[in-house]
Image (cartoon, coloured by chain):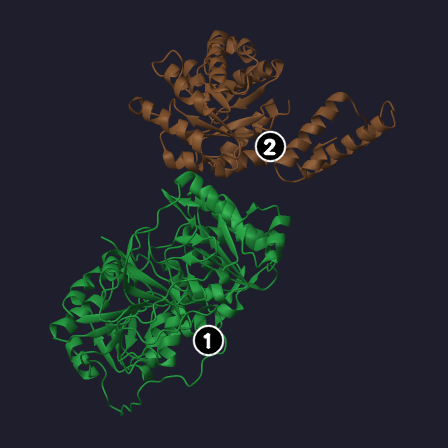
Chain colours: A green, B brown
Amino acid sequence: MINAAGRFIPDTLPGYRDIRPYAGPFATVPDGRRAGQKIKAFRPGTSKVLASLEEAIEASGLKDGMTISFHHALRNGDRVMNMVMQTIAAMGFRNLRLAPSSFLDANDDLIPYFESGVIVAAQCSGARGRLGAYLTTHRLQEMTILRPHGGRARAITSGELHIDVAFLAAPACDRMGNINGIEGPAACGSLGYAMVDARYADTVIAVTDHLVEGALCPVSIPQHLVDYIVPVSSIGDPRGISSGALRITTNPRDLLLAKLTARVIETAGYYREGFSMQLGAGAASVAAGRYLRDIMLRDRITASFAIGGIPGPFCDLLDEGIIQTLFDTQSFDARAIQSLRDNPRHQEYDVDHYANPWNKGAMVNHLDYVVLGATEVDVDFNVNVITDSHGTIMGAVGGHPDASAGARCTIITTPLIRGRLPIVTDRVQTICTPGETVDVIVTDRGIAVHPSREDLRENLMKARLPVMDIKELRDLAYSITGEPDPLPITDEPVAVVEYRDGTVLDVIWKPQD
Amino acid sequence: MHESLRRAMLFAPGNNPGLLQHAGIYGADSLIFDLEDAVSIHEKDAARILVRNALATIRYPCEVGVRINHISTPWGFDDLAAILPARPDFIRLPKCEEAEEIKRIDDIVTKAERRYGFPEGSIRLMAAIESPRGLRNAFEIASASPRMMALAIGGEDFATSLKTTKTKDGAELFAARSMIVYAAREADISPIDSVFSDLQDEEGFIRETELARQLGFDGKSCVHPRQIELVHRVFTPSEKEIQSAQRILKAYREAMARKAGVVAVDGKMIDAPMIIRARRTLAHAVAAGLVPQEDLND
């Protein structure tokens, strides 16, 4: 069948539930009730602190075939996922379903567990490095599922993704099980991903290298959600978690994109006192924040809130009063972690609150602007952020489709050409965000506006911004790079790209050798 | 002939494919692809081919020239032979000392235009003066060919040939700068100021650009895209200057329409130089996007 994004979706996929094809950003109307944790009653005097991971895994009742989860807030500094998997493998478990919020480069070490049958299925936001390549070239027992952050929260809260045991890297934890992410040697800031797992997993194991005596304060994940606590020597390498303060780029092309993006925000039609935005953490997005700051100071305009992953430069805008509140699901650098700790208007919140399409109103629904990147975009405004020019998984869907669906104006910022590759093409390899939820594409050689947004186009033209037809941009790119040949792929599906509502947006096929 | 403004001329090294590909996106008024000092002797031939192909393949939004190696070097003539078929908008000759050099290049360009069927005179020339000898011959060089469109000062080399160094206040180049402006203006071509190579010193760059503008230069060579905006800012007239220019031109147009004689604006008599200056101010305002193009058409 062909779904509403124009993609061919097979009628069945091996190791995947009944297929619901993507039918439009808000086509699915949910029914039923939310899922929930098993009820447990811990009596006074119960100790949660166990001596080892083995003990905790045994106590959790983990069995072959179950689903386990992790969060990725420690990014490439994370040691917990690899450490836990090593223990699980040594204990002889098999056929597990691994459902972390995302994989990062640090998770290349997991490949042997896929090869040996310890892990037989992966559900995540994305994967990089050798693991990404492995998931592209190996069909697992179940289809690998790639979900946006909001889609993962939906799958968990609706019971579609049931987590048996969640292993939570806990930067700071007290003996009762209260957790936060802003203290300890592996502080990572917001625990926005972990908060959802903690509420819905049957068993929650906190793995910490900073066990606090007395009561931890503030609390991000409360004790009543946590079963066991395992102290270990280190949960993460701070150098991989955060990189001091993220610097504003000096790359002239990124700065040009940033300036154009700030101008689009200023003139597209939603820039007014109290507007709201999500700016990504890419170089151009962060720099756009800096240019926007000057514009907002000049006009004496403040933003009511900004959301998304938060890099340090946005905390400066918060301190200056240019942004009134930050909502933070993931803190990108040491500056953001410090701000979350010290500034009461820097608010930690979970991914359900941020982006779940099946609740009573996620924050993304209240965005005026979101600025996002792209690996490639096509003439239908579809965006790919997950597969590279070889068709290999090398990125994560993240909150891209969530914020795009929610925001009144979705801006994609990308150079028109990267290296030898045209970024505006006829057809993206993999659709991660459907074009009907994208409004403006800002490139270094021109700006394209979705044909359904004549209002935006007029506003940008009035501001004398270089508005072009998307096909002109494609032609310009092809005139320099040539038109790329279609990628040679096989007819073997390896992964499903789910839209935020759980419908199938696209399928990733194994590339030819 | 109406010439577009040459406020910021951006250099891009001819051996860097990425920079050549993107050079046009930063809003420079002119691009100069460099085959000379930016390219080591081991890469001269590769850079030549790369620049030729960039010119032939990529549509740039502004004029594009090539700085060739001097024709007294082993590479200069080969540079011309490789580049001319791709029809650059102009050729920049470095270290120019005599009008004869321009005439020889003019000959070669004329032949190439005929051979490749380009309109005669369409490929322009500019020269950089980088020595006292070149400075002494500046007017002859500037007027050596009808193709000549600009005269630049190569500040670093000039300072070296004076046995001094280029400083940020530029006292050592003051006379040379002015003399180049005189020569270029006498020949009715554009004087272009030297590069400023300390990328970290934004204030110093702005000061030097302001000095160049005050001395009469039309523009400045840039070695980094982020200098372009600074040059444009310096060369952009103030709101007050723009309004005054608009009033002068309006009064002038009305006077012409009424066939009236002398007119005054703001208590000042309008004379021919004021009208020329007003047009120039408006041209800069149009280039900066501050007034619509129509305001220039009278």
Disc number placed over residue A28 in the picture, else none: 1
| Residue named by callout 2 | B235
Asked if residue A293 is positioned above or below residue A505 in the image, the reply reads above
Asked if residue A40 is positioned above or below residue A161 in the image, the reply reads below
Tell me the quarter of the image containing the C terminus of chain B.
Answer: top right
| Residue closest to the eye, A362 or A320 | A362
Q: Quadrant of residue B51?
A: top left
- SS category of the residue bearing label 2: helix
| Residue closest to the eye, B249 or A240 | B249
Which residue is rendered at x = 49% and y = 17% of the image? B113
Residue A90: x percent and y percent?
Answer: 11, 72
Q: Chain of mark 2?
A: B
Circle 1 residues within 10 Å: few <14, some 14–19, many ≥20:
some
Which residue is rendered at x = 54% and y = 23% of the image? B192
Instruction: Identify residue type, mark 1.
Output: Thr
Instruction: Identify residue type, mark 2.
Output: Phe
**Residue A183 appears anywhere in the view:** yes
Residue A304: x percent and y percent?
Answer: 55, 65
Asked if residue A42 is positioned above or below residue A185 in the image, the reply reads below
| Residue closest to the eye, A200 or A313 | A200
Q: Quadrant of residue A214?
A: bottom left
